[in-house]
Image (cartoon, coloured by chain):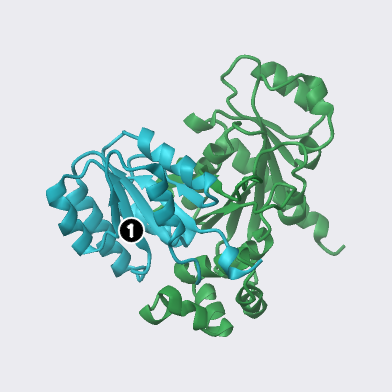
Amino acid sequence: MSQAGAGRSLKREDAAVMAEQVMAGEIRAVARVITWLEDQQPLGPAVIQQLLLPARRAMVIGITGYPGTGKSTVIDHLITAYRRLGHRVGVLAIDITSPVTGGALLGDRIRMQHHADDPNVYIRSMATRGQQGGLARATRGALQVLEAAAYDVILIETVGVGQNEIDIMQMAHTVVALVAPGLGDDIQAMKAGLLEVADIVVVNKADREGADAAIRDLREWCPHVIRTVAVKGDGIAELIAAIAEHERLKDLAQMPS
Amino acid sequence: MTVASAPLRVLIGKVGLDGHDRGVKLVVRALRDAGVEIIYTGLHQTPEQIVSTAIQEDVQAIGLSIHSGAHNSLFPRVLALLKEQGAGDVTLFGGGIIPDDDVPRLKAAGVQMLFRPATPMHDIVDFVKGLRTDR
């Protein structure tokens, strides 16, 4: 990004100039506009209005699931796989804001840090800042910014509370829900919420005891259940294929007859 | 929400081959409790990873913990990369085992503040809370 656009002087830049820089893929501009959206500064929506979305729209994949099931680790491997396929990858990793102090520990990207120097991967940690439903207030705007900046695969990681994270349905084309063995019986699987919104269910940590039973239980309720051991990369290729198949069927369903 | 009440965003991490993270985790927790949004990168980061992360996350400040003795090369490298990538406005501070003799040189190079052993936690929190939030 040009020196003129750097630092605090960005604030005085015209929204149209900022929008140009976002569409040129300038990372500092992308990052600053997302900050404006998070901070609810009027410049944020002003830039969004000026953005032109690419003709070929991004594939938006939501990753949700209970805390500690391995969402960030799965995303780390998905980034690697989509980069090998030649995509530019954007990640929005949402973590919860403390309702008590307003602070947040955003630690999802620890698992993804070896992608930090890849210029074709943009990772942004976002705090919920009081928003319920598993996403941050500015998630939709941030998604538009990444799409305009020509990231053609966008992964959204929800906070991971589990049973009320349905906002992701409105934003992602494919929702992947993670569970791990030993987190409950088939009655948990029958409950409303997470598994209802999922297009694909992943049983991660599938080398642990109880994985087969979990998969058997889940297959009664969900058509697409995949087993992964994300720390070893096992099952990631199957997950990529399942996502692609879901996207294809969704595209077909939307085609005029 | 007014601009002034937007939370500070601060990157906290450890650079180089140094696994001593008890102190940095305490700092992360204290800052979270003080209402700061902390992007924690974990261990073994390169200066390049730190700087590209700071830019992607649009943080106001970077705090690095170094106990390996490599502070004289790692801090200046981070400063140089920030400048090179047009992010010279990001505040760099640090903490760890840093001998007296090295402190003036690092501060002259642009490290805003160095917190050494036995620093009261509220000194670190006060420093971070005093950073500018407008942008």
User: What residue is drawn where x is 39% and y is 55%?
Assistant: B127
Looking at the image, is A189 positioned above or below residue B52? Answer: above
* Side of A129 where A125 appears, left or right: left
Q: Secondary structure at mark 1?
A: strand
- Judging depth in this view, the residue of A142 and A88 nearest the camera is A142
> What hue does chain A carry in this figure?
green
* Side of B47 where A124 appears, left or right: right
User: What residue is drawn where x is 60% and y is 43%?
Assistant: A240
Q: What is the x, y in percent for residue A68?
A: 59, 31
Q: Is residue B53 something that shows in the picture?
A: no
> What hue does chain B carry in this figure?
cyan
Looking at the image, is A120 positioned above or below residue A167? Answer: below
User: What residue is drawn where x is 71% and y is 45%?
Assistant: A175
User: What residue is drawn where x is 17% and y is 57%?
Assistant: B104
Q: Which residue is mark 1?
A: B92
Q: What is the x, y in percent for residue B45?
A: 33, 45
Q: Is residue A4 something that shows in the picture?
A: yes
Q: How many marks?
A: 1
Q: What is the x, y in percent for residue A133?
A: 75, 48
- Judging depth in this view, the residue of A202 and B96 nearest the camera is B96
The furthest residue to the right: A257
Tell me the quadrant of the picture where the N terminus of chain A can be found.
Answer: bottom left
Q: What is the x, y in percent for residue A130?
A: 69, 52
